[in-house]
Structure formats: C-alpha cells, structure tokens
Image (cartoon, rainbow, N blue to C red):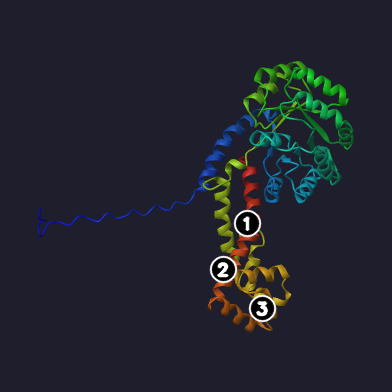
C-alpha cells in the first residue's frame, strides 16, 4: 500500500520529563506538630497522666547532643555508646538530665534469631561501661541502668542476677537506679519479682518487656494490680493505652517507658534526613558567602575568600591532616604541596595537576569541606528541634 504524498506525518512520541519534587519538610513538620498538639491537650488537662518516655535509638554524638539540647530523657545502649557519648550522657545526668542505659541484651537476642551462633553478651564489659559513666557523674541520681538478663529466659536471668549481685549493690550505693527486667518462665511474674527482690534485698525499677517475648495485657495488669511496685518501666514501648491503663490500676506507681522514634524519620524521603539535607545546603550557601545563619552559629567563618587565603596563602601553618586532605582532593602528592616555596609556585603545581582548573577545584573543595564540618552541627540542630516538638 502506498502512502499518500501529503498525508500528515506520524507524530514522534516525546519522552516526558520527570517532574523534580522537593520534599516539603516544613509542611510535613507542621502536620506532625498539629497532630501532636491534639495529643498534648490531654496532658494539659491531666498533667498527672503524662508518662516519661526515654528517647532511645540514638548512638551518634550529633543525635545525643540534639536530645540534650532539647532537654529530653534519653535512652542508650551501653554497648553502642562510644567513649565521647558516655562522657556526654554523664555530664547531662550531672546537670539534672535523665538517662536510661540498656545492657544490649535485647539487641543480642534479636541478633541470635538471625544468626544462632551469635556470642552471648559479656556482662563484665557491660558493667565496666556502666562504671565509666557513673564515675564521670557528679550526681548520678538521674541514671537508670539495666541489670543482666536473657530475653525470654526467666531462670537464666535470675542466675545472672545472683552472679552480679555484688556489682549491682555497688552501683545502687552510688544512688543509681537499677532496673530488673521481668522475663516469663515457670513462675508467674509476681513470684519471679518476689524472689528477685528477696535475693537482691533492695527496691528496683521493674522492667516489663513489650517487644519480643512480651507479656500479655492480662499478665501485665494482674502483676500491676497485685504487687503495685513503686517503679515500673515498659521496655521498648511508647506512651500507649496499655501504659495509661496500668497507671489507672496503680496510681501511686511511677511509670516510664522507652521508645525508638528517631529511626523511622531517617532515610531518603523521610523527615529528619530531608530536613537536614535542605537546611545544610542553605547553611553552607550562607557560610561560603560570609553570611550568618539563624539556625547555626559561627558559620560565617567559612567565607570562601578567607578560607582560600588560609588554605593557599599560609599553607605552612595548616595542620598536616588538612594539607593531606587538600592534596588528596587536588590529586597531587602531599610532599609536592609541602615543597612549594611560595603561593605562586603552589598554584602552578595545583594548576598542572588539574589541567589549569585549580581555582575551581579549590572552590569545590571548600564547599565539600564546609558540608562535612557543618553537617553534624545541622544534624544536632534538626534532632533538637524535632525532639522539642516530641516527634523523635
């Protein structure tokens, strides 16, 4: 079949250009804040109903600093906490902050489900780290540490209590609270509680598991109504109807809980990560132009012209690590950089190794370095703002 000479041409399909979308973190934040305000109305009307929730799940220094700035009660796993983090929480407790320190037994239990050959937790090391925090506290009364236990194994947990009774006594003498998790087993929770109390000969915070190997609602309420302990902590549980009903059944008991809210806001397309990324870009833009920023202090010291002068005008005064970082980025041997006699010879070396684009490369290096230095500060600011709004 012949095609007519003047037939209209078949249109060439045009590939649609994907729409570029920016995560609307300010709107998401407003929506979450509005929802939270409705919940807070209950606490405004009945302040006695408010339950202290320790914000767990943070292990980095930046996130811990954010929680500290927000004045939050903080929960950490002692085996995940670095020495600087342990020092930070010790200082926070000394200033009146509240910190809950977990042994990592639950983490070990979960790892064992994935890998049966997972090594059991070393409680000697756990207590060494407990003492590292306690020794740095001027007043450790706001500190709670978790006694040794094995998730889901009542008798083994009791045996560990007996083994570490001396260490537990030493800690309580320092005015530190000790939590004893109540594991399920052949005895009822009330019976297990009674033998733990008799063996330790002290009051302790009762830990009730609410994740793996958790107690049923009836078990929780039977225990609370019968024993009415002074302090109860729901492990791995946010402020829920279960906690408030327990409070109703034993009004004189002080209830606390710990919940990981941070991680669900981390990742691409999630509030904390997107908020940090966009604010960081804005802060860096201000910094390299020598402008201050309302969210982060002292960013104007990253004024590009001044940093350029520091990097290339006074190369001999820079720290060796800074010279190495610059040389690596500029694709030149650090020895060659250090051998340059003056600023002009240095520029010649950099130009030669970068095809005459040394100035542009140095500018990019400054921006990248600025991002790296300011990113933890922005992360702390974002974590603090979200914690103050009770989102993380």
Q: Earlier in the sequence, mark 1 or mark 2?
A: 2
Q: Distance of mark 3 from mark 2, alpha carbons?
A: 21 Å
- In the image, residue 4 lies at what x, y percent? 9, 57
Q: Nearer the viewer, residue 227 or 3?
A: 3
Q: Which mark is residue 375?
A: 1
- Comparing 277 with 212, the one in front is 212
The reply to whether the C-beta atoms of the residues labelled 3 and 2 are less than 8 Å apart is no
Q: State whether residue 291 appears in this view.
A: no
Whether residue 7 is visible here, answered yes or no, is: yes
Identify the residue at image location x=55%, y=45%: 271
Where's residue 267, x and y in %?
56, 47
Q: Quadrant of residue 339?
A: bottom right
Q: Nearer the viewer, mark 1 or mark 3?
A: 3
Give the alpha-carbon distance from disc 1 to disc 2, as whole Å: 16 Å
Kindly identify the residue that appears in the image at 61 percent across and 42 percent down: 263
Q: Which residue is mark 3?
A: 336
- Along the viewing direction, whichever of 358 and 246 lies nearer the viewer: 358
**Residue, x 75% and y 20% (percent of image)?**
189
- Marks 1 and 3, Cα distance to the nearest angstrom? 31 Å
Question: Label for residue 364?
Answer: 2
Residue 354's quadrant in the figure?
Answer: bottom right
Above or below, comparing residue 301 to residue 89 in the picture: below
Q: Earlier in the sequence, mark 1 or mark 3?
A: 3
Task: Find residue 107 and report its horizontal and vertical position in percent.
Answer: 69, 37
Looking at the image, is mark 3 or mark 2 earlier in the sequence? Answer: 3
Residue 49 spot, x, y in % from top left: 68, 27
Discs 1/2, front:
2
């Amino acid at each position: 079949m012949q095609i007519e000479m003047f037939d209209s041409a078949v249109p060439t399909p045009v590939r649609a250009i994907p729409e570029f979308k920016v995560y609307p973190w300010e709107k998401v934040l407003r929506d979450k804040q509005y929802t939270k305000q409705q919940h807070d109305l209950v606490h405004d009307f009945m302040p006695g109903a408010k339950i202290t929730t320790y914000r767990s799940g943070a292990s980095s220094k930046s996130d811990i600093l954010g929680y500290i700035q927000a004045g939050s009660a903080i929960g950490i796993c002692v085996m995940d906490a670095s020495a600087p983090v342990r020092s930070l929480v010790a200082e926070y407790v000394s200033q009146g902050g509240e910190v809950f320190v977990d042994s990592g037994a639950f983490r070990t239990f979960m790892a064992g489900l994935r890998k049966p050959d997972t090594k059991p937790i070393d409680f000697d090391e756990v207590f060494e780290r407990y003492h590292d925090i306690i020794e740095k506290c001027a007043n450790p009364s706001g500190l709670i540490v978790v006694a040794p236990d094995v998730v889901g194994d009542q008798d083994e947990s009791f045996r560990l209590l007996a083994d570490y009774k001396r260490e537990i006594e030493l800690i309580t003498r320092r005015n530190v609270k000790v939590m004893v998790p109540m594991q399920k087993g052949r005895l009822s929770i009330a019976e297990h509680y009674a033998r733990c109390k008799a063996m330790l000969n002290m009051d302790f915070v009762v830990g009730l598991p609410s994740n793996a190997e958790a107690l049923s609602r009836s078990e929780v309420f039977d225990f609370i109504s019968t024993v009415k302990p002074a302090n109860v902590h729901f492990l791995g549980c946010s402020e829920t109807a279960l906690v408030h009903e327990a409070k109703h059944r034993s009004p004189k008991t002080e209830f606390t809980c710990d919940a990981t809210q941070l991680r669900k806001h981390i990742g691409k397309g999630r509030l904390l990560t997107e908020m940090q990324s966009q604010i960081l870009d804005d802060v860096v833009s201000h910094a390299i132009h020598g402008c201050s920023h309302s969210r982060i202090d002292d960013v104007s010291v990253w004024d590009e012209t001044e940093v350029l002068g520091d990097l290339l005008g006074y190369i001999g005064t820079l720290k060796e690590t800074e010279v190495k970082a610059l040389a690596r980025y500029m694709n030149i041997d650090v020895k060659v950089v250090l051998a340059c006699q003056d600023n002009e010879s240095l520029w010649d070396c950099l130009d030669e190794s970068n095809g005459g684009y040394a100035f542009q490369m140095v500018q990019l290096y400054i921006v990248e370095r600025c991002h790296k230095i300011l990113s933890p500060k922005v992360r702390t600011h974002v974590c603090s703002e979200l914690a103050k709004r009770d989102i993380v």
